[in-house]
Image (spheres, grey):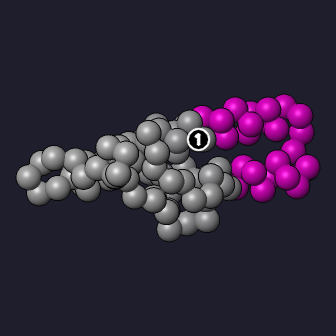
Amino acid sequence: MDNQLTYEKAFERLEKILTTLNEGKASLEESLKLFEEANQLINSCSSKLTMAEKKIETLIKARDGSLQLDDNGQPLKETFEPESKDLFSKKELTQ
């Protein structure tokens, strides 16, 4: 599997794998290979989302470079919503 896949390409491949597995037509051996690939894709997508979260946190810093804090003194974060239908659904950025 290409480790340089974009999030969108990895997610698209993951959707195809899930469709194939849900159809129940793949052999056990093929299903195991697809499951392993899906696991790698999930890890890759998760990693890319985590990196996006960190970038968003950086981007919402105030212009003077300080973090904007909420009433509890925690850094303000924004909700990250990917454009495509996502298995992970809406992912709110939290600590």
Whole-percent x, y for residue 47 in the image = 47, 38
Residue located at (70% from left, 55% from top) = 16
Q: Residues within 10 Å of mark 1 (few under 14, many from 20)?
A: many
In the rendered image, the quadrant that contains the C terminus is top left
> Left of 9 or right of it: where is 18?
right
Report whether residue 27 is seen: yes
Residue 19 figure quarter = bottom right
Whole-percent x, y for residue 51 in the image = 38, 42
Q: Main secondary structure of the magenta part?
A: helix
> Left of 38 or right of it: where is 11?
left
Front-lying residue, 90 or 36? 90
In the rendered image, the quadrant that contains the N terminus is top right
Residue that protrudes farthest toward the front in the picture: 71
Residue located at (88% from left, 55% from top) = 23
Q: For the magenta stretch, what is the residue range?
A: 16-40
Q: SS for tag 1?
A: helix
Residue located at (91% from left, 49% from top) = 24
Q: Which residue is mark 1?
A: 41
Front-lying residue, 11 or 83? 83
Front-lying residue, 79 or 34? 79
Per the image, is 70 magenta?
no
